[in-house]
Image (cartoon, grey):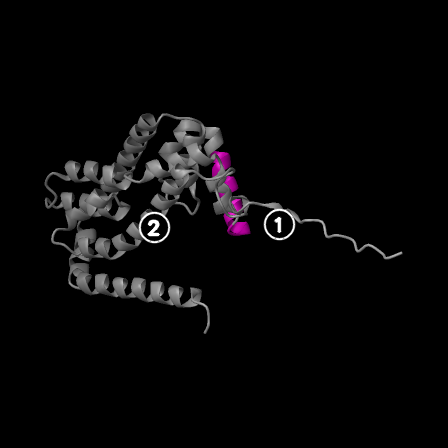
Amino acid sequence: MPTREPTEEPTKQDTQEWWEQDGLPWNSKPTKQDYWCLGWFGFVGLFGLAMIPLRAWLLGLDPPVMLALTGSRIGAASTGALQAVGQADNWLFYLLVGSVMAIKFDWIYWWAGKLWGRGMLEVQAGRSKRSARNIARAEAWALKLGWLGIFLAYVPIPLPIALVVFVLAGTAGMPLWKFMVLNFVAKTLWSLGYFALGMVIGEPVVYVLEQYARVANWVAIALLVVIFVGAFKGQSKRQPSQ
């Protein structure tokens, strides 16, 4: 009597849909909203790269108060230093506009939390053991503080506090308007703190800015070259060998 060969049982990987694979934030078949949200994250990454040489150029302006419009810590501190020597008229306007510019994409993280829950955090945590530890620490802080965590999202420490807090705000169902208002207030308070620090230091910062202004254009060009070379090398590695 002929023996019957055993059939192979389908593995979990074989039965998974493509959208169930590890490394993706959603827990069900993605919709148009999911694709749009993910696309916005890609746009934010490209925008961040474009801003690197632009910030370097803005810092070289005379006086470089326009850098405050980016909402950066350096921009706020340098504006405070310039105000200390009377070179930063309308500084409050620059800081307030800078706060708006700094938080302009934060709604995407809130949206990701609303759509995917902790999915975005799990994707970030899956990159490495170190990332997983940092996400866990930041999440522990965020859960203890609740909505007050938004005011600590801009603490300059090497933990992804802002990412975790913003995603959890969407996960918890916080209204978008409330999230953005609290975020604006938090960012403005931190900017005022850096502005005050720049005022205290004052003239030495202005001297450094003046020296930097002489090479700012070259720094911006060098950063552009680094970005393009890095992108070219990354594209070359992704291409299959012939």
Could you tell me which secondary element the residue under label 2 belongs to?
A: helix
| Residue nearer the viewer, 133 or 169 | 169
Is there any visible trace of residue 20 in the rendered image? yes
Membership of 130 in magenta stretch: yes
Inter-mark Cα distance, 1 to 2: 33 Å
Q: What span is in magenta?
A: 127-141
Could you tell me what secondary structure mostly forms the magenta stretch?
Answer: helix
Q: Which residue is mark 2?
A: 45
Residue 98 sits in which quadrant?
A: top left
Q: Is residue 239 above or below residue 36?
A: below
Quadrant housing the C terminus:
bottom left
Q: Position of residue 12 (x, y in %)?
A: 64, 47
- Say what amino acid the circle numbered 2 marks: Gly
Q: Which residue is mark 1?
A: 14
Residue ID at (26%, 54%): 50
**Tag nearer the camera, 1 or 2:** 1
Magenta region includes residue 24: no
Looking at the image, which is closer to me, 132 or 46? 46
